[in-house]
Image (cartoon, helix red, strand yellow):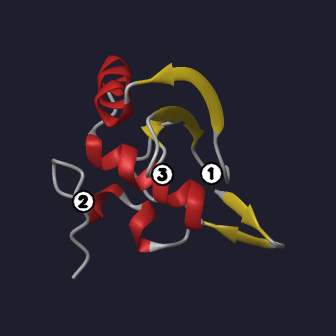
């Protein structure tokens, strides 16, 4: 669970403890922690391809990576922070 201004937000099932992601519009790879807003910069570049490779070593899927990125940017209570709302390629499929 994550705290949000005195409220507790239940995190979606299936999120990893942490993962790597590519910052939208940039080539830099960042490190995300489940339930935390924002990211930690890394010295990694190579965009989404590199983030995907690093996540494969951690056993993190593209859907999980996208959900983690959405949660870290928009809050952990949004539908986009749930990996069940993505297909296997990491594309959002909220209907």
Label 3 vs 2, first from the N-terminus:
3
Most distant residue in the bottom direction? 95
Q: Of the residues under marks 3 and 1, which one precedes in the sequence?
A: 1
Residue 81 spot, x, y in % from top left: 45, 62
Above/below status of 85 relative to 50: below
Marks 3 and 1 close (CB-CB < 8 Å): no
Residue 46 in view here: yes
Picture quadrant of residue 7? bottom right
Count of numbered circles on the image:
3
Residue 93, horizontal then vertical, whole percent: 21, 70
Name the element at disc 2. Answer: loop
Residue drawn where x is 37% and y is 21% of the image = 54
Residue hosting label 3: 69
Spatial CA span between label 3 and label 1 = 11 Å
The spot of residue 75 in percent (x, y) is 60, 66
- Which residue in the protein does label 1 denote? 35
Could you tell me if residue 76 is visible in this image? no
- Callout 2: 10 Å neighbours few (<14), some, many (20+)? many
The residue sitting at 33% across, 55% down in the picture is: 83
Q: Quarter holding the C terminus?
A: bottom left
Left or right, 49 with respect to 31, comes to left
- Lateral position of residue 87 relative to residue 92, left or right: left
Q: Position of residue 70 (x, y in %)?
A: 47, 59
Under circle 3, the secondary element is helix
Q: Are marks 2 and 1 in contact (CB under 8 Å)?
A: no
Local packing at callout 3 (Cα closer than 10 Å; few below 14, some 14-19, many 20+) is many
Q: Is residue 76 above or below residue 47?
A: below
Q: Residue at x 35, y 46 (%)?
A: 64
Q: CA distance from mark 2 to mark 1?
A: 19 Å
Mark 2, residue position:
86
């Amino acid at each position: 669970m994550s705290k949000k201004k005195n409220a507790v937000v239940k995190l979606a099932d299936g999120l990893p403890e942490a993962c790597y992601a590519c910052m939208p519009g940039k080539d830099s790879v960042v490190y995300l922690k489940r339930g935390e807003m924002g990211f930690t910069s890394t010295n990694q570049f190579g965009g989404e391809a590199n983030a995907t490779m690093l996540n494969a070593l951690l056993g993190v899927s593209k859907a999980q990576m996208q959900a983690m990125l959405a949660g870290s940017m928009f809050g952990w209570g949004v539908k986009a922070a749930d990996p069940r709302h993505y297909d296997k390629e990491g594309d959002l499929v909220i209907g």
